[in-house]
Image: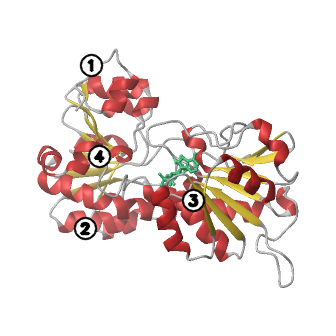
Amino acid sequence: MRISVVKEIKPQEARVGLTPAGVHELVAHGHTVFVEAGAGDGAGFTDDRYVDAGAELADQATAWARAELLVKVKEPIESEYGFLRDDLTLFTYLHLAADRPLTEALLAAGTLAIAYETVQDQTGLPLLTPMSEIAGRLAAHAAAAHLMRPAGGQGVLIGGAPGVAPSRVLVIGGGAVGTQAALLALGMQAEVTILDTSAQRIRQLDGIFEGRARVLVSDALTLESEMRQADVIVGAVLVPGRAAPKVVRRAQLGLLKPDALLIDVAIDQGGAFETSHPTTYEEPTFEVDGIRHYCVANMPGAVPQTSTRALTNATLPYVLRLADLGPEAAIDADGAIAQGVNVRDGRIVHAGVAAAFDDLASTPV
Ligand SMILES: NC(=O)c1ccc[n+]([C@@H]2O[C@H](COP(=O)([O-])OP(=O)(O)OC[C@H]3O[C@@H](n4cnc5c(N)ncnc54)[C@H](O)[C@@H]3O)[C@@H](O)[C@H]2O)c1
């Protein structure tokens, strides 16, 4: 099969769809891989490394035109819509329910569009988890950095010092983001509490942390009591397919320490704090009622080398299956890939996307 990787042109996106190691695997399976010249620059992969791995370099138009399977990171933006075709399979993050123009472009072109974020196996959402894990670790970095005075913080070292108490980090939601945020904060010797509403998840967390972090069921009273004591609160909740539940309301900001820092990782799902709005790395924080909020919506974008490797580690088994079997047979054989199909033969087939656009052609399965 002919597989292409193009340079991401969405602003602030430096990741790339495949690493040279991923290209090498595909070539070893007998496939031809085209890589747009410069595609890996932002992620630290030179053209030479792709060529050494067996790729053929191409310009943007050629890479799109030769592809039977196009492996990307972000959804195509408007200037790429013209490259969509009915004999193309697109495998990337799509987030179509929030993107009507792209949904219409995919329908009009007849492209087979498989979205990373809806590929689902028995473990959950395997192509979203790696970015959550990275965002979680970055949340602990952000906490440490923004507690320091040069970044406008209260001027404390997150883990304290010998004889000086550490900061208290409250993580609300102990999933992929929350677990990694807690692990890294603990590694910096902060005092960590994790709250979750799922009894099953609480049990798993108890096993993971073995008493090093306090793991508690989140009810209204416990939440308020923990909020009062926290120096940092990390919002890491998720209810799949829904906007993030608001776990801290504006009226509750008055309960917090005046120099507490709120880090809302769930901002890409609307935010876990009522007072959050999305920010970027250019200006990551803002204040509401004197309380600092950090709400960067694309946290893994800061570490494209790590993110690209983690993403390829997760996507490559699926890319290999799509390429080896061909997309149609891979969809029939692999339920996880089938869940990823969003648009096919000019119709929306993913129930969530169909629900978002009830006036567009759909056959939800
Ligand atoms: N900002 C970014 O760059 C970025 C990157 C990756 C992920 N995210 C977001 O981070 C959030 C968390 O993702 P995840 O992969 O960790 O999800 P996850 O499903 O692995 O974990 C979410 C956890 O929240 C818990 N939860 C749900 N409602 C709760 C509530 N009211 N109180 C306490 N706990 C509650 C769930 O039981 C679950 O354990 C999502 O919104 C995701 O989109 C953001």
Specify few, some or many for label 2: CA neighbours under 10 Å numbering under 14, 14-19, or 20 or more. some
Element carrying mark 3 = helix
The residue where tag 4 is placed is 70
Across and down, in percent, residue 174 comes to 55, 58
Quadrant placement of the C terminus:
top left
Alpha carbon distance from label 2 to label 4: 16 Å
The answer to whether the beta carbon of the residue marked 4 is less than 8 Å from any atom of ligand 1 is no
Q: Is residue 6 left or right of residue 229?
A: left
Q: Is residue 88 left or right of residue 313?
A: left
Alpha carbon distance from label 2 to label 3: 33 Å
Q: Earlier in the sequence, mark 4 or mark 3?
A: 4
The kind of residue tagged 3 is: Gly
Q: Residue at x 69, y 75 (%)?
A: 188
The residue where tag 2 is placed is 25
Residue 275 visible to an observer of this rendering: yes
The residue where tag 3 is placed is 178
Across and down, in percent, residue 263 comes to 69, 52
Q: Residue at x 40, y 44 (%)?
A: 93
Alpha carbon distance from label 1 to label 4: 24 Å
Q: Which residue of the protein is positioned furthest toward the top in this rendering?
A: 359
The residue where tag 1 is placed is 361
Q: Is residue 320 above or below residue 61?
A: below
